[in-house]
Amino acid sequence: MPSIGFRPAGENDLEFLGTLYASTRSEELAPVPWSEEQKQAFLAQQFSLQHRYYRQTYPAADYLLVLHADEAIGRIYIAREEAAINLIDIALLPTRRGRGIGAALLGELIDEADRDARAIVLHVEPNNPARRLYARFGFRLVENRGVYEFLRREPRVAVSSG
């Protein structure tokens, strides 16, 4: 994995975060017969609602920008709870997808969860390409919630010999 870093996402990052959010929805909106201006307004509204929901629902979560050479290339939002780590959101710019960065980030989170004997939970749209990645890393379907699937990965706790 290339040299990846993190920093807390702040108010000054909202423009980048909005652009990142829009990049995750552009394919979905492609067939919609709206003008580009209408699509951008819709995406800005949806981002604002999502951002507010995450902050209100998970006030103690880590809201991190994913950095490469100090340049923001994505986001990862994580709520570390007693029984489980909730992977609220992970997204990378289109030019950074498919390069193993998401898998490496997920692998690091799994290592942490296994060390702490905590499960990881997340929601994902069934048609999201990351769904296959989650399955490869041992996430299992807990519940189909319509638009989203609720997935869980149980910790793999090392057994000591002794």
Image (cartoon, grey):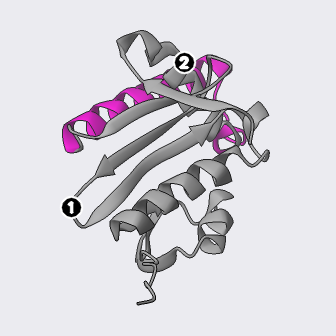
x then y, percent, for residue 98: 78, 47
Magenta residues?
Answer: 28-57
Q: Which residue is mark 1?
A: 82
Q: Quadrant of residue 21?
A: top right
Q: Is residue 128 visible?
A: no
Q: Secondary structure at mark 2?
A: helix
Residue 56 on the magenta segment: yes
x then y, percent, for residue 102: 64, 48
Farthest residue in the bottom direction? 162
Q: Which residue is mark 2?
A: 16
- Answer few, some or many: residues within 10 Å of disc 1's Cα (few below 14, many 20 plus, some between 14 and 19): few
78 left or right of 99 in image:
left
| On screen, residue 72 above or below 158 | above
21 left or right of 28 in image:
left
Q: Is residue 1 visible?
A: yes
Which of 113 and 22 lies nearest the eye of the viewer?
A: 113
28 left or right of 162 in image:
right
x then y, percent, for residue 153: 45, 73
The structure residue drawn at horizontal position 46% and vertical position 79%, both measured from the top left corner, is: 158
Q: Secondary structure at mark 1?
A: loop
x then y, percent, for residue 82: 21, 61
Residue 50 on the magenta segment: yes
Q: Earlier in the sequence, mark 2 or mark 1?
A: 2
Which of 41 and 58 lies nearest the eye of the viewer?
A: 58
